[in-house]
Image (spheres, helix red, strand yellow):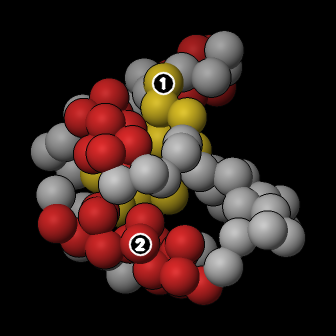
Amino acid sequence: EHQLRAVPGVRLIGEPAQRAGAISFVKEGIDVPAIGRALSREGIAVRAGHHCAQPILRRMGVEATVRPSFGIYNTFEDIDALVRVLRSL
């Protein structure tokens, strides 16, 4: 979460008291599908869209988000790769 917050233009969606493995975000000036495609080209799998949650997303001021889900199988290098691609956009 901290590394994502440090990327210029990235806005995390939602402020739960504790996060599970999924983090939703948008990046200023870049549409969600373009972010998803850029990450996919680097072998990084994310969901990019409305996630069947349009009412709550609209309440949070967005129509779609990028949502990586992290698990025990992810490495620090995976997170670094995600952040590197986001910084390059």
The quadrant in which the N terminus is found is bottom right
The vertical placement of 3 against 56, above or below, is below
Percent across and percent down for residue 71 are 80, 63
Query: On the rendered structure, is 69 left or right of 71?
Result: left
Read off the residue under disc 1: 49
Query: On the rendered structure, is 81 left or right of 1?
Result: left
Q: Secondary structure at mark 2?
A: helix
Read off the residue under disc 2: 81
Percent across and percent down for residue 54 are 58, 16
Q: Nearer the viewer, mark 1 or mark 2?
A: 2
Percent across and percent down for residue 89 are 16, 58
Give the residue type at disc 2: Ala
The quadrant in which residue 72 appears is: bottom right
The vertical placement of 47 against 85, above or below, is above
Query: On the rendered structure, is 70 left or right of 84?
Result: right
Percent across and percent down for residue 28 are 22, 50
Identify which residue is drawn at 31% across, 45% down.
41
Q: Secondary structure at mark 1?
A: strand
Give how far apart the Cα atoms at labels 1 and 2 are.
21 Å
